[in-house]
Amino acid sequence: MATPVFDGQGRVFGIVILNYNASRLLQSLRYSIPVELRVYLTNRDGDYLLQPDAGRTFGFEHGQRWRWQDDFHPQPAGAGQPDGLQAYTSPNGTAYARWLDIPFDPAAPEHYCRVYAVLPDEAVAKLAQTARLSALGSALGVFLLIGLVLAVYRRKYRQANARQAELAAIVESSHDAIIGCAADGRIDSWNRGAENMLATRPRRRWANRWRISSSCPSQTTASRRCSACSGNRRRWS
């Protein structure tokens, strides 16, 4: 920063210059961003103040002009270009960038520095690959979950079938007369004990003739049905 010094008659007799070592500030700007990004800082004329190649900064102090617009040339927007990023042709290939103007004084916005955040094309490809792998991982996770659910279902189904077969074997081997009925009270299954108890009539015939009035019998109803069995046996004998 610099400002002139005037005497009592308004004549300039000196100048005050304040120099500030901004090296740490500029380096902190570089280290506080993701590793995929490259940071460029320029003045309003495009001269580099900060960039990955430190030897090409502050060229105006050495009679050189190392400028952003000489290295990065805008490309027309095309398919596959990331949203909100401008594509450039650079010495290192295609790159994508966004920028932000930082005025030194809000009252004088024409004096500013410009910060560019640059994403090289290979970094974009890696990010896209990572996104695809993430999507693939999510899909594989869903398929794995579906497979797990199906495996549990098959296991429960086999267990239910085994239990049903076990109960059927118990009922069939029992010496007691056991009958099963549908929800409407119609007898639809019986064991050998029931056949022996009602052996005087063909089982299809007595199964069709006997309908139980309730599908959810209580203990009293069950007793009445046992009596009905005995009565039917005596009547059909």
Image (spheres, grey):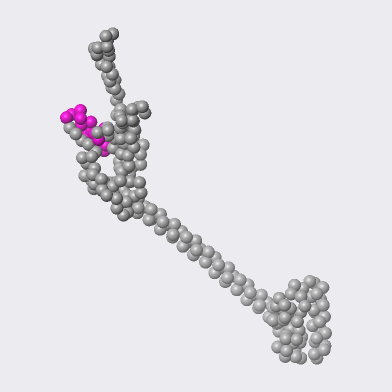
Query: Could one spot residue 176 in this view of the protein?
Result: no
Q: x and y percent of residue 78 in the render?
A: 29, 53
Q: Nearer the viewer, residue 154 or 106?
A: 106
Q: Is residue 27 above or below residue 184?
A: above
How many numbered discs?
A: 0
Magenta stretch holds residue 158: no
Q: Nearer the viewer, residue 188 or 129?
A: 129
Q: Nearer the viewer, residue 37 or 194?
A: 37
Q: x and y percent of residue 218 in the render?
A: 79, 71
Q: x and y percent of residue 76 in the render?
A: 27, 49
Q: Is residue 204 above or below residue 5?
A: below
Q: Which residues are magenta?
A: 46-63
Q: Residue at x 31, y 43 (%)?
A: 97
Occupied quadrant, residue 184:
bottom right
Q: Residue at x 80, y 86 (%)?
A: 232
Q: x and y percent of residue 29 in the render?
A: 34, 34
